[in-house]
Amino acid sequence: MEKQATQLTPKQILEKEFKTSLKGYNQDEVDKFLDIVIKDYELLQKKIEILETENGRLKTEAKKYTEQQPRQGTAAGNTNYDILKRLSNLEKHVFGNKLFD
């Protein structure tokens, strides 16, 4: 997924000045609203940074896990072979060569 850059920074929102007219908006009301927008924007930026860091960590962890999988499969195969070999030796010992004649 392509990362899209934000168009505004909290500082740009804070420093934005609106032109006033005869029937313009209440400046205090606009300022209060922009303060809320700035706080939300900063919070979202922090969350994005945290999630990007966690995503990178999880990708690294997943890569290590997938690299270990083939090795574990081989080890399990060797373990099964060793168990079968031991069982065969045990059967020879218990039943003697009668079983294999």
Image (cartoon, rainbow, N blue to C red):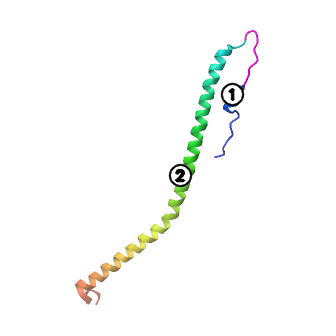
x%, y% of residue 3?
66, 44
x%, y% of residue 100?
29, 87
Name the front one of labels 2 and 1.
Answer: 1
| Residue range highlighted in magenta | 16-23
Q: Please, what is the dominant secondary structure of the magenta stretch?
A: loop
* Picture layout, residue 52 above or below residue 16: below
Which three-letter amino acid code belongs to the residue tagged 1?
Ile
Exactly how many numbered labels are in the figure?
2
Residue drawn at point x = 35 percent, y = 80 percent: 85
* Picture layout, residue 45 above or below residue 1: above
Which three-letter amino acid code belongs to the residue tagged 2?
Leu
Q: What residue is shown with label 2?
A: 58
Q: What residue is shown with label 1?
A: 13
Q: Secondary structure at mark 2?
A: helix
- Comparing 101 with 26, the one in front is 26
As for residue 17 lying within the magenta part, the answer is: yes
x%, y% of residue 49?
59, 42
Residue drawn at point x = 56 percent, y = 48 percent: 55
As for residue 97 lying within the magenta part, the answer is: no
